[in-house]
Image (spheres, helix red, strand yellow):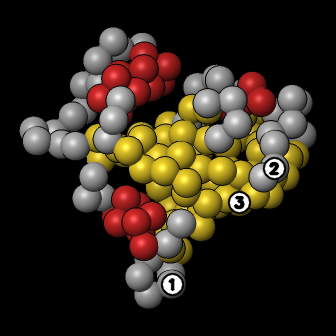
Amino acid sequence: MANIPDSHADLLKKKAFANLATLNADGSPQVSPVWVDTDGTNILFNTAKGRVKTRNLEREKRVALTIVDPDNPYRYVGIQGRVTGMSEKGADDHIDKMAMKYMGKEKYPLRAPGEVRVIVTIAPDKVFTMG
């Protein structure tokens, strides 16, 4: 497992979006912007069950993502890794935490009726940085 260097660890704490790449069933790439979090070792993001990226991750655990510094687009961290967990447990509270970080709202306001939230955990295998 690779670690995110201290020089770029702040990108997981600030309001920086990640672009997450997964693989479709036919092998073509699929990219989604996601809100990111960390447990100190792994990358976490929250999504809804049934979305394309969720289906892709259930089938293929390998991912890549970049997190670009919103204050300096020439500074970023790139991560290649694998999904080590997908859990509904705590996902509703986690999306509210992410809504506070990214939107300044206590509750996630974009939830669809009947939506089931999932926390995805990514273990970094390779990490590269710029800036």
| 55 is higher (above) or lower (below) than 67 | below
| Circle 2 SS class | loop
| Residue ID for mark 2 | 2
Calculate the distance from the C-alpha at mark 3 to the C-alpha at mark 1. Answer: 17 Å
Badge 2, how many Cα within 10 Å: few under 14, some, many 20+? some
The amino acid at mark 2 is Ala
* Residue 111 figure quarter: top left
* Residue occupied by mark 3: 80
3D distance between C-alphas at marks 1 and 2: 25 Å
Three-letter amino acid code of the residue under disc 3: Gln
Secondary structure, mark 3, is strand
The front one of 82 and 73 is: 82
Q: In the visual, does 11 lie left or right of 130?
A: left
| Residue depicted at x 80% and y 40% | 4
Residue at 10% in and 38% down: 113
Q: Earlier in the sequence, mark 3 or mark 1?
A: 1
Q: Which residue is mark 1?
A: 27
SS under mark 1: loop
Along the polypeptide, which appears first: circle 2 or circle 3?
2
Is residue 131 in sight in this rendering?
yes
Q: Amino acid at mark 1?
A: Gly
Q: Which quarter of the rendering shows the C terminus?
A: top right
Taking the image as shown, residue 128 lies to the left or right of residue 32, namely right
18 vs 92: above or below: below
Q: Mark 1 against mark 2, which lies toward the viewer?
A: 2
- Within 10 Å of disc 3 (Cα), the crowding (few <14, some 14-19, many 20+) is some
